[in-house]
Image (spheres, grey):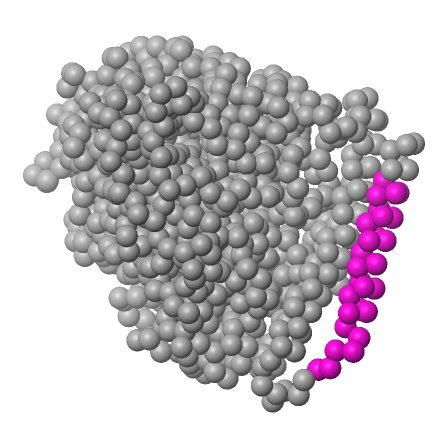
Amino acid sequence: MKFNQLLVLLVGGAFFLAMMSLYRMLEMTQGVKLPHSETPAGPEDNDLSRLKQQIDKLERLLSDNNRLVATLRDSLFSRQASRVKGVAANVSSGSAHSQAVALPGCRLAEEMKDGADGVQLLDVYDLLPFDNPDGGAWKQGFEISYKGDEWDEQPLELILVPHSHNDPGWLKTFENYYQDQTKHILNNMLIKLTEDSRRKMIWAEISYFSKWWNNIDEQKREMVKRLVKAGQLELVTGGWVMADEANSHYFALLDQLIEGHQWIQRHLGVKPSSGWAVDPFGHSPSMAYLLKGAGLSNMVIQRAHYAVKKHFAQQQTLEFLWRQNWDSSPRSDITCHMMPFYSYDVPHTCGPNPAVCCQFDFHRLKGGRASCPWRIAPQPITEQNIKERALLLLDQYRQKSRLFRSPVLFVPLGDDFRFVESSEWDAQFGNYQALFDYFDQHPELHVKARFGTLSDYFGALHRRLNAAGTTLPTLRGDFFTYADRDDHYWSGYFTSRPFYKRLDRTLEATLRATEILFSLTLAEMRRFHGDDRLVADFPTSKHFQRLTAGRRNLALFQHHDAVTGTARDPVVVDYGTRLFRSILNLHQVLQSSAHWLLLSDKSQYHHDQSKPFMQMDDVMSAQDALPRKMPLKLSDEPRSLIVFNPTEQLRSSVVSVVVDSPGARVVDAETGRPMTTQISAVWAEPSRASTEHFQLDFVVELPPLSLVVYHVTKASVDSAHRAQYTFHRRGNPPAVQSEHFQVSSPEGPEADAPLSLSNKHVQIWSSPETGLLQKLQLRSGLLRRVQVQFLWYGTRTQTEKSGAYLFLPGDKGAQPYSSLDPPLVRVSRGPVFSDITSCFQHFSHTVRLLHLDGHAGRSLEISNTVDIRSEVNRELVMRLVSDVANSNRFYTDLNGFQMQQRRTLSKLPLQANFYPMSSAAFLQDAASRVSLLSAQSQAVASLRPGELEVVLDRRLQQDDNRGLGQGVTDNKLTASLYHLLLEDRRGGAQEVGGASVEHLSLLAHLISLSLSHPPMTMVTSSDSQVPKLHRFLPLRSSLPCDVHLLNLRTLEDSQKAESPSQEVALLLHRKGFDCSSTPDVELQCTWSVHEEVNLADLFFPLRFRSLRRSNLTLLREDDEPESARRQQTCLRPMEISAFRVELD
C-alpha cells in the first residue's frame, strides 16, 4: 500500500512541477513586444530566440512528464505482476546490491523449450563427439541403405532445380564477372528456357540481374516477364546479393533486401517467396527473421558444420522450422531446408557418392574444360546406356531421400558461374530430360522427376507433409562456426581485411543519417510551400540518385566475399573505391539537406556544387586511408559548426575539431551560451606535439535528429581549459616537445604507482609500465579486475595454414605481445575527457573517460590503431582478463540484432571457439556483467573463464585452399573502436539453465547506439557571407529508450524512375533489454511495458498524412489497409516494424 501511495505522490509532484514551470514561462512572455518582420536583428531577437528555446524545452518536459506518468504506472503494473508470481519486489533503497524492481518492458532471461521435437543447437553441440570417422562414399556421413519398396505407396517426387551461383566480386571484380560470364548466362537463359516450357531455373543476385535488365531491349524484357509469370524463372531471396551472415549488420542486411525487392516489384511485379543461401560461410537466425518479415515462407541453406549435417541427417531433421531464440510463439518460424552434403555443386547434391554424382554433371563431358576429380567421366545419355545410367542415378536419389521425412526430393543442378555457354544448357537439359522421360516410361521405378524451382519444391513438400499429417521439428540457434572438413574452422574471415569492415560501418552510418535528413528535408520543403512542391534549386533527383548508389554500394559489400575480406586484392580495391565514393557523395546530400533546413530565410538557398555552403570536418583522402580532421582557421569572426545528431535520442556528446589556435571559444549560436571546452595537443609523433594544430573538444547536448549550430572563435590562450600531460616510459624517460601544454614525467615511487583516471561514474587503474587497464570500479562500489593484454597468434608449421577464410593457429596458441623497447605511455587530463595512450611498435591503444553526465560518461572508450604490415603469418589479439565467473558461457551478438549464448568447448580445437561479433559481446555472473560494445565486426572468443578476446588484424602469406589463390597481405593502418561497460546485476539476475536467452541492458543499447551513430560535424565554408541559421528540431522529445529508428528511407516514385516519391519507409526496431541491470545513471528517455504505441505521440510534431503497416521490404501488396486508428500500432520487443508513410 505504501508503494501505491508513493506512486501517487510522485505523479502528483511531477504534474505540479510541470504546471508551475508552465505558469512561470507564461508570465515571462507577457510584455514582450514582437518586432515587425522588417526590423533589423537586435537584442529583442536574441531574447525571443531564448524564449522560444525555453518554450521548446518546456514542451519536451511536458511530453516527458506524460511518459514519466506512464512509466510509473508501468512500474506499478510490473510490481503487481511480480507479486502475483510470488517474486520478491522490494523497491530499491538506493543500495547497489538491493533487490530492484524489474524495468517495465524488460525481458527476463529464460530457457526456451520446444517440446520433444524441438532442437536447440547449443544442446546439439554439447551432444556431438566431433570425432569425424570415415563414412565411406559419403566421407563425412554414413552408409545409407534402403529396401526398395519404400516408394511403392508414394512415388519419389524428384525436383531438379537448375541454378548458377554468380559472386558479385571474388576472383574478378563485379564488372569483369558481368562482362565475362554473367551477361552470357542470362542471355542464354532467355533463349534456352523459351525453347522448352519444361525447363526451369532460379536466380538470386539482383545486382547482376538489374544490370543485365538495363542492357536489354523491351522485347527481351517482355520475354523475361513471360518466363517469370509461367514459373520457368524464379527470383529467389531477391536480395541485391547473397549476403554474408556473420559480419553484416542487420541494417545493411535488410537494406540490401529492400533494394532487391523494390527493384523486382517495380520491374517484374512479383515478390520472392523462397530464400537461397548456398555459399555464405555459416548461417544466422537474424537473416531468417528478415526473410520471414519480408514475406518469404521458405529458405535453403548449405554451409553448416559437417558434424551437424551428419547428426541432422541421422535424425531426419535437415528440414525444420527455424524459430528465433527469443520468440515463444511460431510467429517467426520459417521452413528451412539444409543441404546434407559437402557442397552445392553437382557432385555433392544428387546423392551421397560424389564419384557417381559427378558422372551426371554433363558440363564435364569428355573434351570439355571441366572434368571429374574421381576420374570417371560423364557419358551422354543414349538408348544403349539409358537404363544403366537411370538406375545408377536413381540409386543416389533414393539414398538421399532417406535423409528426409517426405517423399519429395530437392536436387540442385549447378555451381559457380554455370550455364555460360549455349552448349552447357543443351548438355544438361537434354540429357536430364532423357532420364526423366525414361523414369516416366517405367512406372515400376516409382519416381516422377522434373525440372523445377524452389517454389515448386516447397509447394510439393508442404502438400505431402500436410497430407501425411507430418510436422517439421522446430530449431533455435545459429550455424557458426562453420567447418567444411577436419578441423578447418572458418573463423578467420570474421576479422580478415578489418580496415574495410570498419569502412563498411562508416558507410552504413553515413547512409542512414543521410536517408533520414533527406526524407525530413523533402517533407519540410513540401510543408513550407504548402502544395507538395519541392525547392526548384534543390537537386532532388541528383541527390536521390546519389542515395540509390550509396544503398547499392553498401548492399554490394554485404556479399559473402566482400565484407568477409575473402576477395582478391584488386577486387578489394574495387569494393573500397565504391564505399569511399559513396561516402563522399552522401556527404553532398547531407550537406545540401542541412543547408536548406538550417536557413532562417529559405529564399536565400542556392545550390552550387563547385562551392558548397558547408563541408564535413572529417576528410578521407583515399579508399585505404583513415579519416582525418580538417584543420579550421579561426579568427575573431565566428566560424559556424553544424552538428547533426542522427539518433532518435537526446544525447550528451563530445564534439572534436582541429583548429589552428591554442585558444578558442565555442558558443551556442542561438543563445550565445558558452560551451565547456578543452584544448588538447595534436600529436604528430608519440612525444612531439604539433605547433600548428590543436584539438578542440566541447560538450554538447543534442536533441533527437537535430541540427544544432555553434560558433567558434579565436580567443586568448587562457579561454579554454588545456589538457595536462604526464609521460611514462620505463628506464628511458622520453624527450617531449610541447610548447603549449603542461607536461610532467614522474620519478621515483610516483613512477611506479598505478595510473588512475575517474569521472563521476567510474574509476580505472592502469599499469604504469604499459598504460594498459588493470581494474575498474563503479560508483556503486562494484570493483572488477579487467586487464587488457595484447597477444600474437601464429599459424601451423605443416602444409595447411591460416588464410583469408581459415584460422589454423600454431600449437603454442596465443603468445604475449612483447617489444624490444618499453612503450611510451601518455596520460592526458582535462575537464571534457581524460585518457591514457600506450604507444607500442605495432599499435597504439587508448582508453578514455568522458566527463559527462548520463550514460555517455558511464563507459570506457577503447580505441586501437594497428599496423602489422611488417609481420609474417601473425594475428594480433586484444584480450580482456577479468574476475567475472562466467564458467564456459559468454554471449555474442548476431548482426547487431540479437544476442546468442556461446559455450567454449574443450573437445573442440581453439579456432572452433571463435565466433563473429558485429557489435557486442559480454561475460556475466550473478553479480556483474562486462560488455564490450564494438563499432566494427571481428572474431571474438572466451577461451577461459573471465576472458574475452577480439582479433584485431591478421596478415597471412599463403592461400588456405578455398579457391582464393592468395594470402592476406594488403593490410592497412587500421582503427578499431569499442566501449567497455561494467554493470551490477541484481533483481532478476538468477542464473538460468540450458540455452538461456539474454539481451543487452538498456544502458548498453544506448551506448551501442551512440557508438554506431556518432554526431556528424559540418563546417561552413566561408563565414563572411553566412546567412542567419536556425537550429532544426524535428522531434519534441526522444523516442522511448528501447525503440530504435532503424531508417526513414525515401521510396522511389512509381511513375518516374530515379526520382523520390512522397512515400517514406519508416522502420522501427523495438529492442529487447535485460531485466537484471537497472541503469544507475539518469536517462533522458522513457520506456514502457505496453506493446501498443501511438506513433503520432512518438514523432510529434511530425505528422503522418498516411500510414500503413507493410512487410519489411515495403512491398505494396503486403500493405495493411489504413484504419481509423492508424496512429496506434503494436511494437513488440525484438521485432522490427515497417510502415509506408507520407510525412506531412
Question: Residue 806, percent across and down?
Answer: 27, 27
Asked whether residue 839 is drawn in magenta, I would say no
Residue closer to the observer: 445 or 527: 527
Please report the residue visible at 65 percent of the width from the left and 78 percent of the height from the top: 44
As displayed, is residue 918 above or below residue 18? Answer: above
Q: Quadrant of residue 86?
A: top right
The picture places residue 949, in percent across and down from the top left corner, at 39, 25
Whether residue 1002 appears in this view of the structure is yes
Q: Is residue 319 left or right of residue 493?
A: right
| In the image, residue 17 lies in the stretch drawn in magenta | yes
In which quadrant of the rendered image does the C terminus lie? Answer: bottom right
Classify residue 706 as left or right of residue 318.
right
Q: Which residues are magenta?
A: 7-34
- At 27% from the left edge and 17% from the top edge, which residue is drawn? 815
Predominant SS of the magenta segment: helix
Quadrant position of the N terminus in the picture? top right
Q: Residue 59: x and y, percent?
A: 72, 62
Q: Residue at x 47, y 28 (%)?
A: 756
Query: 288 left or right of 14?
Result: left
Image location of residue 168, percent across then percent down: 28, 49
